[in-house]
Image: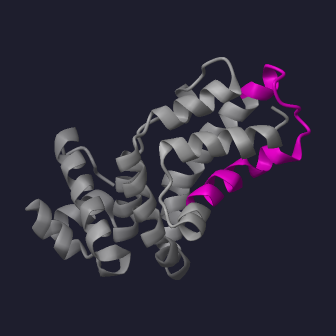
Amino acid sequence: MARSRLTPERESELYGAVLDLLREVGYDALTMDAVAARTHSSKATLYRQWGSKPELVARALRANKPADLTQIDTGSLRGDFQEMVAQTDDCQMEKDSALMRGLAHAVHANPELHRALRELLVEPEMTGLDEVLNRAVRRGEVDAGNPALKLVPHMLIGAFIARPLIDDQTVDRAFLSAYVDAVVLPSLGL
């Protein structure tokens, strides 16, 4: 798929428009026509660049990620988690949570979206988190046989799902930091 015709600035503008529309209307009501109108581009350009709505949405979400987890290495697992939390802000976390809640239903109903999100968003994040956790094992902070190692992603995603449900509040940096200290790190023996 030819993707070289857009400047990074234009690509960023298109991704921003896609995310804004997702927040406004949700995945099911998001159309390539609406993206084209919002960005003053043609549908043909969108399909030529991304091929499909699920691919465009997944790439927009991936471009929205603030950090590459594999680049975070403070020398301790707790420090790495603190740095992950520090690299976002409460406003962005709230927007990201709203996007993910909005996509949760669509993922189950749309196999192509599910595949694109797994490939472009979930798997790179899992790879990054695995690298952070493997470094902790190599440093001797966490026992390689600790069964909680495989459950860290589930714990973190659980925080984003449970907080709004139980506390009627969005996840913010203070909550996430406290959650990591009280739940994630103790489960890993720290």
Q: Residue at x 21, y 59 (%)?
A: 17
Q: Residue at x 28, y 51 (%)?
A: 2
- In this view, the residue in front, 39 or 5, is 39
Q: What percent of the width, then of the height, locates residue 76?
A: 69, 21
Vertical side of 121 occupied by 106: above or below: below
The N terminus lies in quadrant? bottom left
The mark tally for this picture is 0
The part of the chain drawn in magenta is: 135-160
**Residue furthest toward the right?**
145
The C terminus lies in quadrant? top right
- In this view, the residue in front, 27 or 78, is 78
How is this picture coloured? one colour
- In this view, the residue in front, 107 or 102, is 102
Residue 123 appears left or right of 148: left
Say which quarter of the image contains residue 181: top right
Q: What percent of the width, then of the height, locates residue 168?
A: 51, 67
Q: What percent of the width, then of the height, locates residue 103?
A: 45, 70
Q: Residue at x 89, y 41 (%)?
A: 146
Residue 141: in magenta span = yes
Q: What percent of the width, then of the height, locates residue 81?
A: 61, 33
- In this view, the residue in front, 42 or 184, is 184
Q: Residue at x 30, y 81 (%)?
A: 29
Vertical side of 139 occupied by 149: above or below: below
Can see residue 42? Answer: no
Q: Main secondary structure of the magenta part?
A: helix
Can see residue 109? Answer: yes
Residue 97: in magenta span = no
Residue 34 appears left or right of 158: left
**Residue furthest toward the front?**
167
